[in-house]
Amino acid sequence: MSSKNSVMVFIQQDDGIVSEVSVELISKARDLADKLKVKVAGVLIGDGVAKKCEDLYPYGVDEIFLVEDKRLAHYTPVPYTKIMVDIIKKQSPQIVLYGATTTGRDLGPRIASNLKVGLTADCTDLQIGDYKFKDSEYKDILYQIRPAFGGNIIATIVAPEKKPQMATVREGVMKVGTPNPGLKGKVTPVPFTFSDSDFPSEILKRLREEKLVDLKGAQVIVAGGIGVGSKENFKLIYDLAHTLGAEVGASRAAVDAGFISKDHQVGQTGTTVRPKLYIACGISGAIQHRAGMSESARIIAINTDAEAPIFQIAHYGIVGDLNDVIPKFIKAFKAKQ
Ligand SMILES: Cc1cc2nc3c(=O)[nH]c(=O)nc-3n(C[C@H](O)[C@H](O)[C@H](O)COP(=O)(O)OP(=O)(O)OC[C@H]3O[C@@H](n4cnc5c(N)ncnc54)[C@H](O)[C@@H]3O)c2cc1C
């Protein structure tokens, strides 16, 4: 099998560390490629990153096209676009996937515009299926699925006429497959000749701000909504989170009201999470919130309104005032310890 018609993933690295979303995408690409009976290809661009390839084979990538150069250590749009366009033209993948990260959101449209192909942004699911339009029938094309119209509908977008079909995919929505150490792949170094005009900009200094909130990595999340009532009362949410060793999440309404900062927001325009336990306090469960947490293994909801939509997806529901319930919760948990 050649890489022609493959499902290709742009493997994003930052400071030599492969981003989690790239591993998620390789896992998803494996599923899609198995349905299409083609290979999974990856493109890894950076400096001194060849050793990372071994870690990626167990997730199902068959061949990694590797481009290394000191000047490629960090993402810069012009040379990265040029390399990707060149590899795509030579390898003719049928699908190319990017993480919907700052880098993927910058790189994807540049490549789409260069190749004059479509790109669907921020997908939350990808499937393979057929499509009929007027007299034309298309077999095995990529269904690019994402919320649209403010999250009120889930749209399936197709771009059947031009290849590759390209999509950026939200971080955290695709499940990382179980690594299989028996899977082996190969690296194909791609020599690249650059001219100075390929580097119109230069990175002089990189400033990194440490992430203070790690919603994606949290096993337990206690999230508060507008029902918490005030910024001061969010202390209750923090108290419960500290008691359980949990991270603090929030609905957009709570963020918009200034109760808590945006990096705590869960949902369609926040972070997608999949913890072992998600406790939703004073959150109604709007579709845009559920889009970011409905895959949690266990959901507990505390709400005064027995009809709140959150109870439709909660495994355990407590109808009551969070001001009464949370202190009892903390007391009961401490008593058990
Ligand atoms: C394009 C778009 C993107 C969006 N993205 C997101 C997103 O990423 N994340 C997100 O969360 N939202 C998002 N939203 C907003 C979303 O539609 C809802 O408005 C929001 O989730 C509501 O937040 P909430 O549940 O805190 O507030 P509400 O819907 O007002 O619910 C508050 C709940 O608190 C309960 N309550 C009140 N007092 C108490 C009490 N004392 N004890 C217990 N329960 C109580 C009420 O019964 C109610 O159910 C988005 C909207 C749009 C249009």
Image (cartoon, rainbow, N blue to C red):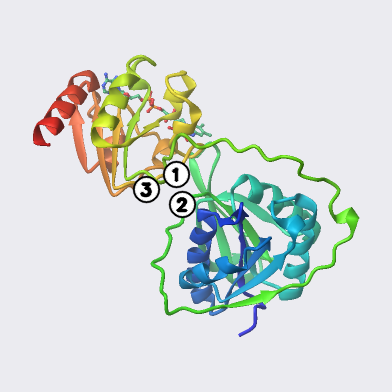
Mark 1 surroundings: few (<14), some (14-19) or many (≥20) residues within 10 A: many
Among the two numbered marks 2 and 1 on one chain, the one whose residue lies closer to the N terminus: 2
In the rendered view, would you say 96 is above or below 267? below
Residue 223 image-quadrant placement:
top left
Mark 3 falls on what kind of element?
loop
Disc 3 within 8 angstroms of ligand 1 (CB)? no
Residue ID for mark 3: 274
Earlier residue among tags 2 and 3: 2
Distance from disc 1 to disc 3, alpha carbons, whole Å, reads 7 Å
Q: Amino acid at mark 1?
A: Thr
Q: Quadrant of the C terminus?
A: top left
Counting other residues with Cα less than 10 Å from the Cα at mark 2, is it few (<14), some (14-19), or many (20 or more)? many
Q: Which mark is residue 173?
A: 2
Q: Nearer the viewer, residue 306 or 251?
A: 251
**Quarter of image, ligand 1:** top left
- Say what amino acid the circle numbered 3 marks: Arg
Q: Residues at badges 2 and 3 in contact (C-beta under 8 Å)?
A: no
Q: Residue at x 53, y 49 (%)?
A: 170
Q: Position of residue 83 (x, y in %)?
A: 76, 63
The reply to whether the C-beta atoms of the residues labelled 1 and 3 are less than 8 Å apart is yes
Q: Is residue 68 left or right of residue 276?
A: right
Q: Which residue has dot 1 on it?
A: 272
Residue at point 53% right, 80% down? 37
Distance from disc 2 to disc 3, alpha carbons, whole Å, reads: 9 Å
**Distance in Å between CA atoms under marks 2 and 1:** 6 Å
Tell me the tag on residue 62: none
